[in-house]
Image (cartoon, rainbow, N blue to C red):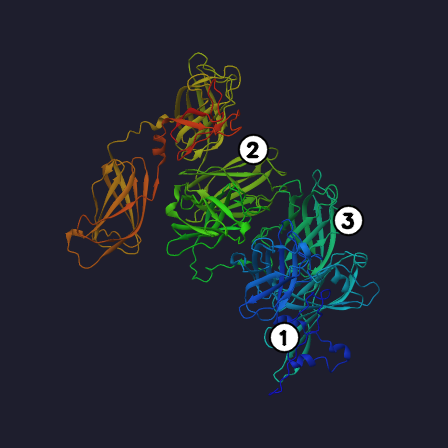
């Protein structure tokens, strides 16, 4: 009263359960007097200015979802209330009367939604929920959780409960305090309030009861979600009457300063759903200063199936913008401007071609969305074809016209059908979008099934325009303005950008009662010096949720490279007693480091079991560490040819062969839309470290709805060394197409335009022994192994003799156009035991490589027979050419030393520690004539020594040259030392990266262990001696544990694999319950 200030608290809203948002209490905020007077001068009508937008902006709207548990008698008829506590204030008691989702609230297993508005209570810290215990016997209530979403703050909080509010259950409390679970908090870009007014025209039957929705678009195709203006049937009946002006205040994503267009439409439901819309006005508050801006979107047409062009969706562009601003003198200043550069409406002609294959046509309803760089059309139903009365029939082209606001450059489309009617499966060949206004044509090559029965059983697909080079999003990542990130306590620590590497995680859940959980689990991998990955969430694929008791689940995550792992934290986001979880074992494998840790956890992660923790940190010191094969990350680019039907959904397997071995077959993941016509697909793969690469083998298994594939080329880029290898094929992989009719191909690597492997012809000569019954009529196969991998299976079919493999006979087979294996190491030979007297006594095999002009002999002199010798019908034969390499006592060692950023003028010495002994010290002299150990240089030295075997370590000394005295401290940084044994060519790499101090004393030196040993091909070939492996198989003691099936085994080692061997014995029933079976298999050393 002292300074005569007047405060206005407008409300102008219902306090009623069955009106507005159903609240019986409102918090009012003061507004400026100028806004209150705004309507007074004009006629009476306008004085009803609503200040809902201003009030909305000053208050916070909370959308509350309350889940009643799915238990017997969980629901309640009592009156439920809630108090929200923020850091500044609380809301007071809120009665939860009007659920937006259900007439009968809080019933078993249901989620009820409520809206609450509160003013300035600060961030929520707790929630009090209770009821008044009325409603007779059904007052008890089992509350599962409460979720509170505050779009204007950009956060969604999850309050777990999982307890009874019941006088006769649990602890008898009917009021509980709930706290937000920080792991389930979602943050996103805050929403802003929009006041949306719709003006329904004053014409006959203009009104509608349909569900009206709206989408707003800003610049650069930023758009809001699709928002229904009415929440339920009651509101739909109230609004959108003939001649009505309806106002909605909604919170949506912020699309920026300019609204370029809106899309408004309805679902065409209800009685007389046709709607004649006059215009839409959207009012927003100004970002700076007090005031607002209203954008007017004229429509003046029908959204009705039965009127005009039958469309129920319209895109509108702004015509005028009205700005109301509060000036310094307290008056309201109103300006109106016409929108000059509004986007134009374009007409798009869409031609849809159905494929010419059996069963290609569909009678389902088809929907199309077109995306351009300025926005999208929203989903449009392709109703009336201009060319055919029966749409989407085999081999036909259907034309449709779509009106939309200028999309700019069109780059992708989404096609889907609703799988209705009898034959819903549809083979879509191509779609052509023609912009009538700019006369630009956009072609989309589809060639895919939209079917619940074929391919990957999807009826919705995204296609990119032909020749598209941008980033393709998989449909798993949706493109909206909302980015969800969960709150992490470590978010604000200083960020050091660490490289991202893959981690493979497997979790074994225990078998006890209640061991399973439906919570989301996570791991955090912790290294030295507080480096750690972000939370790596372990989400199961598809619709599956949670970890079943006794299950073994595997995940591949990508996180920061924390160096040497010290600890691993495992936890989950469950906070209720129900969400307990018994973890039996956790394993973390790091392929790029070649190590795997196995943690025997055997503990509960639960609020009400054990020590009540839902997260635990395990130390690597308590884990079992296993070496696994080290892998390198390659960027793989697969190019599919641009010919008709080139794409495939078959399974594609790749193996890579290098100078240091070969990889196993790896499946190339289809991921919905890879390996399609004219596409380049790039993805990262972990591949065994076999570089330098020599060749690649690709195989398809011929499964799927489109088993043929036209492969152009594959490019592998080593992300560590940036070395690029190109493998080119340019032909069909197919049993029915192309000249080769093959499902497997081999391609030589091309590195820096140099071919790594040449094509050759192999001449294979097979000598059957001169002994009784030596011949066979069985089918015989071989695989030849050499320094460039193996040849794959070669069937010994066409010999110049009609009767092959007879006693004392030599059979010759020619194999043309095979990639040369270089020097050969072994041959695997086997037969299928078919025909009478299938046993075969093989003397030797000769393999001649025509390009090398060299013959390799593989002696055998054994039976391949089930009833003679050891009963094996597969043998591995070592190459006899490699035997003559008799290793002498003495050998030569080449030593390459790389100096780092600290050079030295002094001398050095090195000693090698081998498995067979230690060398003497070799001096590495530095002189003024020949300067050594300069910064960044590599210096070579050669020494003779006795053969030391495998080199395990080195000693490095740094000594003054010519025995001078040392003044002060002098250091020399050694990056790496590579020791090569010259006779066999084995390499030993020592990554030192250490400063070595200068010292005249002989006992001052630094020692280093070997970080990587590369065995040469000659050394591997020499070590291929026959070895007998005993395989002991113990069958478990469970009912039905035994089997009568044939059992096969493949053994893998550093020298390759054994091939598939059958475990068999004569006259014995194998693999019975609680039985131990022993087998002897002879093969070349693995």
Front label number (1 vs 3) = 1
Badge 2: residue crowd in 10 Å (few <14, some 14–19, many ≥20): some
* Quarter occupied by residue 117: bottom right
- Residue located farthest toward the top when viewing the structure as drawn: 772
Q: Earlier in the sequence, mark 2 or mark 1?
A: 1
In three-dimensional space, the C-alpha distance between marks 1 and 3, rounded to whole angstroms, equals 60 Å
Q: Which one is nearer the viewer's eye here, 443 or 1038? A: 1038
Q: Which quarter of the figure has residue 96?
A: bottom right
Q: In this rendered view, identify the residue nearer to me: 817 or 107.
A: 107
What residue would you read off at disc 1?
Answer: 29
- Asked if one can make out residue 180 in the rendered structure from this viewpoint, the answer is yes
The picture places residue 36, in percent across and down from the top left corner, at 68, 79
Is 534 above or below relative to 586?
A: below
- The residue indicated by pointer 3 is 387
Give yes or no for contact between labels 3 and 2 (Cβ–Cβ under 8 Å).
Answer: no
Q: Secondary structure at mark 2?
A: loop
- The residues tagged by marks 3 and 2 sit, at their Cα atoms, a distance apart of 41 Å
Q: Earlier in the sequence, mark 1 or mark 3?
A: 1
The disc at residue 742 is: 2
- State whether residue 339 appears in this view: no
| Residue 924 at x, y percent in the picture | 22, 47
């Amino acid at each position: 009263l002292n300074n005569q200030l007047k405060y206005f608290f407008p409300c102008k809203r219902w306090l009623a359960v069955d009106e507005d948002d159903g609240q019986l209490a409102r918090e009012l905020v003061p507004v400026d007097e100028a806004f209150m007077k705004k309507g007074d001068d004009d006629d009476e009508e306008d004085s009803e200015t609503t200040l809902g937008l201003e009030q909305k902006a000053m208050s916070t709207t909370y959308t509350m979802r309350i889940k009643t548990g799915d238990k017997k008698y969980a629901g309640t008829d009592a009156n439920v209330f809630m108090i929200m506590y923020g850091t500044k204030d609380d809301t007071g008691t809120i009665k939860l009367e009007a659920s937006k989702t259900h007439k009968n609230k809080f019933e078993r297993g249901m989620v009820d939604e409520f809206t609450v508005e509160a003013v300035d209570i600060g961030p929520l810290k707790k929630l009090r929920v209770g009821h008044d215990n009325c409603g007779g016997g059904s007052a008890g209530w089992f509350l599962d959780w409460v979720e509170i979403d505050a779009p204007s703050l950009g956060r969604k909080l999850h309050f777990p409960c999982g307890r009874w509010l019941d006088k006769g259950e649990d602890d008898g409390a009917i009021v509980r305090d709930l706290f937000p679970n920080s792991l389930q908090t979602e943050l996103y870009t805050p929403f802003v309030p929009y006041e949306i007014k719709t003006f329904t025209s004053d014409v006959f039957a203009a009104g509608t009861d349909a569900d009206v929705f709206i989408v707003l678009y800003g610049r650069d195709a930023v758009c809001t979600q699709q928002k229904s203006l009415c929440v339920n049937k009651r509101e739909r009946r109230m609004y959108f009457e003939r001649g009505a002006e309806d106002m909605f205040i909604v919170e949506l994503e912020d699309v920026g300063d300019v609204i370029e267009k809106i899309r408004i439409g309805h679902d065409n439901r209800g009685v007389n759903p046709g709607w004649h819309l006059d215009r839409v006005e959207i009012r927003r508050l100004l970002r700076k200063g007090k005031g607002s801006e209203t954008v007017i979107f004229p429509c003046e047409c029908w959204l009705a199936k039965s009127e005009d062009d039958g469309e129920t969706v319209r895109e509108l562009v702004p015509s005028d913008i009205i700005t109301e601003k509060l000036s310094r003198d307290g008056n309201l200043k109103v300006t109106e401007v016409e929108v000059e550069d509004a986007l134009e409406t374009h007409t798009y002609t869409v031609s849809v071609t159905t494929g010419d294959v059996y069963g290609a046509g569909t009678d389902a309803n088809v929907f199309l969305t077109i995306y351009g760089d300025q926005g999208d059309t929203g989903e449009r139903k392709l109703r009336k074809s201009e060319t055919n009365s029966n749409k989407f029939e085999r081999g036909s082209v259907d034309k449709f016209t779509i009106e939309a606001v200028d999309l700019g450059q069109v780059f992708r489309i989404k096609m889907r059908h609703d799988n209705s009617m009898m034959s819903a499966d549809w083979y879509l060949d191509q779609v052509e979008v023609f912009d009538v206004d700019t006369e630009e044509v956009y072609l989309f090559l589809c060639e895919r099934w939209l079917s619940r029965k074929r391919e990957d059983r999807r009826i919705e697909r995204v296609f990119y325009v032909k020749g598209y080079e941008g980033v393709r999003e998989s449909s798993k990542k949706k493109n909206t303005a909302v980015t969800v990130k969960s709150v992490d306590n470590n978010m604000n620590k200083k960020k050091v950008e660490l490289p991202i590497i893959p981690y493979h995680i497997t979790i074994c859940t225990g078998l006890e009662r209640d061991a399973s959980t439906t919570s989301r689990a996570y791991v955090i991998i912790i290294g030295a010096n507080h480096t750690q990955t972000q939370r790596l969430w372990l989400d199961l694929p598809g619709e599956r949720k949670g970890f079943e008791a006794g299950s073994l689940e595997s995940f591949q995550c990508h996180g920061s490279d924390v160096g040497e792992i010290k600890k691993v934290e495992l936890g989950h986001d469950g906070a209720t007693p129900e969400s307990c979880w018994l973890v039996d074992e956790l394993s973390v494998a790091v392929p790029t480091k070649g190590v795997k840790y196995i943690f025997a956890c055997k503990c509960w992660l639960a609020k009400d079991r054990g020590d009540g923790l839902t997260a635990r940190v395990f130390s690597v010191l308590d884990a079992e560490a296993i070496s696994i094969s080290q892998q390198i990350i390659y960027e793989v680019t697969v190019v599919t040819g641009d010919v008709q039907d080139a794409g495939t959904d078959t399974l594609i397997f790749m193996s890579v062969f290098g100078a240091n071995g070969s990889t196993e077959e790896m499946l190339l993941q289809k991921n919905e839309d890879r390996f399609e016509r004219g596409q380049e697909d790039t993805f990262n793969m972990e591949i065994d470290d076999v570089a330098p690469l020599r060749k690649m083998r690709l195989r398809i298994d011929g499964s799927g709805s489109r088993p043929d594939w036209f492969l152009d080329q594959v490019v592998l880029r080593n992300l560590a060394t940036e070395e690029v290898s190109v493998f080119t094929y340019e032909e069909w992989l197919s049993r029915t197409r192309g000249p080769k009719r093959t499902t497997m191909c081999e391609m030589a690597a091309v590195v820096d335009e140099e071919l790594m492997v040449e094509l050759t012809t192999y001449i294979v000569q097979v000598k059957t022994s001169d002994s009784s019954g030596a011949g066979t009529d069985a089918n015989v196969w071989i695989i030849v192994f050499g320094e460039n991998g193996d040849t794959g299976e070669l069937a010994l079919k066409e010999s110049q003799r009609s009767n092959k493999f007879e006693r004392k006979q030599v059979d010759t087979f020619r194999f043309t156009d095979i990639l040369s294996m270089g020097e050969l190491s072994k041959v695997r030979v086997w037969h299928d035991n078919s025909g009478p007297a299938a046993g075969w006594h093989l003397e030797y095999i000769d393999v001649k490589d025509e390009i090398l002009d060299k013959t390799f002999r593989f002696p055998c002199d054994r039976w391949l027979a089930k009833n003679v010798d050891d009963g094996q019908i597969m043998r591995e034969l070592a190459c006899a050419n490699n035997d003559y390499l008799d290793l002498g006592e003495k050998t030569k060692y080449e030593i390459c030393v790389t100096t780092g950023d600290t050079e030295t003028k002094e001398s050095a010495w090195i000693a090698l520690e081998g498995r067979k002994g230690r060398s003497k010290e070799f001096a590495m002299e530095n002189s003024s004539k020949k300067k050594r150990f300069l910064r960044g240089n590599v210096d070579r030295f050669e020494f003779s020594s006795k053969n030391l075997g495998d080199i395990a370590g080195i000693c490095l000394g740094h000594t003054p040259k010519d025995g001078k005295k040392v003044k002060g401290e002098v250091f020399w940084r050694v990056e790496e030392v590579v020791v090569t044994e010259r006779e066999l060519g084995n390499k030993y790499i020592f990554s030192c990266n250490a400063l070595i101090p200068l010292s005249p004393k002989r006992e001052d030196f630094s020692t280093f262990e070997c970080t990587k040993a590369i065995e040469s091909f000659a050394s591997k070939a020499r070590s291929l001696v026959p070895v007998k492996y005993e395989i002991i198989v113990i069958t478990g003691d469970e009912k039905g544990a035994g089997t009568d099936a044939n059992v096969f085994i493949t053994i893998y080692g550093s020298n390759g694999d054994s091939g598939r061997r059958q475990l068999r014995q004569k006259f014995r029933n194998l693999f019975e319950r609680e039985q131990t079976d022993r087998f002897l298999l002879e093969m070349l050393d693995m």
